[in-house]
Image (tube, helix red, strand yellow):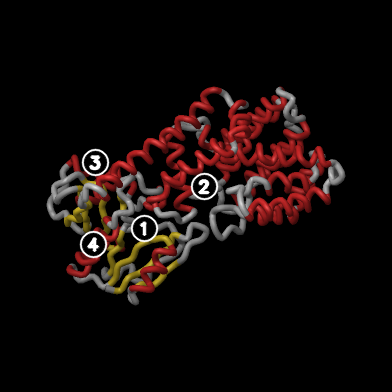
Amino acid sequence: MQEFANSPSLRNGIFDLLSSAKLATDANVKLLDYTVQLFKDNGLFSDYYGYHNVDHELEVTYVTLLSGIHALEDNYISRNDLNYLYASALLHDFDPDKSIDKPHEKNVIQFISKDKTIQKLLADANLDQNLVCTLISRTVYPWKGDVVTTTEKLIQNYFSKSKIKKDKTQQNHFRELGHFLSVSDRIGGYSLGDFQKAMDMAKMNAHSSSWHPAFIVRRSVSFFEDMLNNESDMCQRVLYGLPKHMRKNLLDNIVGFMKLRQEELQIYNQFVYDGLPLVPCIEKNKISDDIADALLSIYRELPKPLQFTRDDFIESLEDPETILNTLRVGNANGPVVGFSKGGPLEKYHFDLQFEDKNRGKNNTVFLEPVAIKNGYWGFHGGREIRQLFMMQVQSKGYKFMTSFAMRDVIEERKKNEKNVVFVRKFDPERWDYFRVTL
């Protein structure tokens, strides 16, 4: 169950919190609406399938305000501090020219320093732009090694231009506020919904960061463990200010990822020590209801932009022109844990503002992204069902095969196979469309 259904309801939730803290000034409300509009105008609204879209920005702002109001009542921060936290949370990830999904804090700050509307609204709210930049700089993650050294220099530079340039106590206090914002940023949406939402967020992060699916769960686990173990005091401080159900959401979601990681390790054990085989199979017969349900369940684990037959998946399985191979455990009749599926390019319609030159020539097969059940990635099963798929495409007399894959993967294939070419590259996702000449 999600706390907020959409961006407008999140926006209203933030407005209510500002009102309760007597911070719903004209400047603050205008800043809220202006920022939402900026995300919309730059293609980073709710329909942008990347972790750092408008929903993330508003979720972080909501959680920061909610916990900040509690810290205000606790005398940990002042109302002025809360105003700085609000503005910084609202602007912390706005990077319109991003070449990758993860925003670059420097680009965000550069944008703020050029946008006259934001500067005026910050001045109207009596906020020092340099201190807002200080807080945003501190949200960089992971906070270790060279990142700390570089960011500390930046922060010191902002302090030197700010109204607290001679006040070391206040400077340390703002460093602490930046840490508060950084932890709120990472708790954000994970405290606002159930495990389905948490998994969707992790998949969005993986897709837009072009990670291999094998890393989604283990990186999520290490992300949370790092926060709970190495920033436990600040983590408790932020969580303490959230209602009980939101604290429970976060901890339930962390446990959910840990359980999945445990399952992955048990599967790994079966493959590495028990020598369990993965068997690729060509599916020639009519698909039974049980197998169709298993395939649909695995298919739904793919990130949404990769579900090319989402509306008619079951019907597409029954199409005589569909080519389907399954990946089974143990033997050819074992449980299905993955599949490769595709068909004539003409049956697919991509909403990607480009047209394949071969569309309409009936000489190209489109391979949908290979789908494998969580825990079974990384054992070469994907490669085997992809190769089996290509053999079938060739045997049917097609001249080309197209598909989408991560840029690094396509680059690697190009080195080994001369017949692979990029057709179109997509940023920031780096999930590109390529063609293989058969």
Mark positioned earlier in the residue sequence (4 or 3)? 3
The foreground one among 355 and 214 is: 214
Q: Nearer the viewer, residue 112 or 73?
A: 73
Q: CA distance from mark 3 to mark 1?
A: 24 Å
Q: Pick whichever of labels 3 and 1 is earlier in the sequence.
A: 3
Dividing the picture into quadrants, the one containing residue 403 is: bottom left
Identify residue for label 1.
349
Q: Amino acid at mark 2?
A: Tyr
- Residue under numbered circle 4: 389
The reply to whether dot 2 and dot 1 touch (C-beta < 8 Å) is no
Residue positioned 27% across, 55% down in the render? 381
Instruction: Residue type at mark 1: give it.
Output: His
Using the numbered discs, state the Cα–Cα distance from disc 4 to disc 3 in whole angstroms: 21 Å
Residue lying farthest to the right in this orientation: 166
**How far apart are the alpha carbons under marks 2 and 4?**
32 Å
From the top left corner, tell me how far across and down residue 192 is, in percent. 52, 32
3 and 1 marks in contact (CB < 8 Å): no
Tag 2 residue:
51
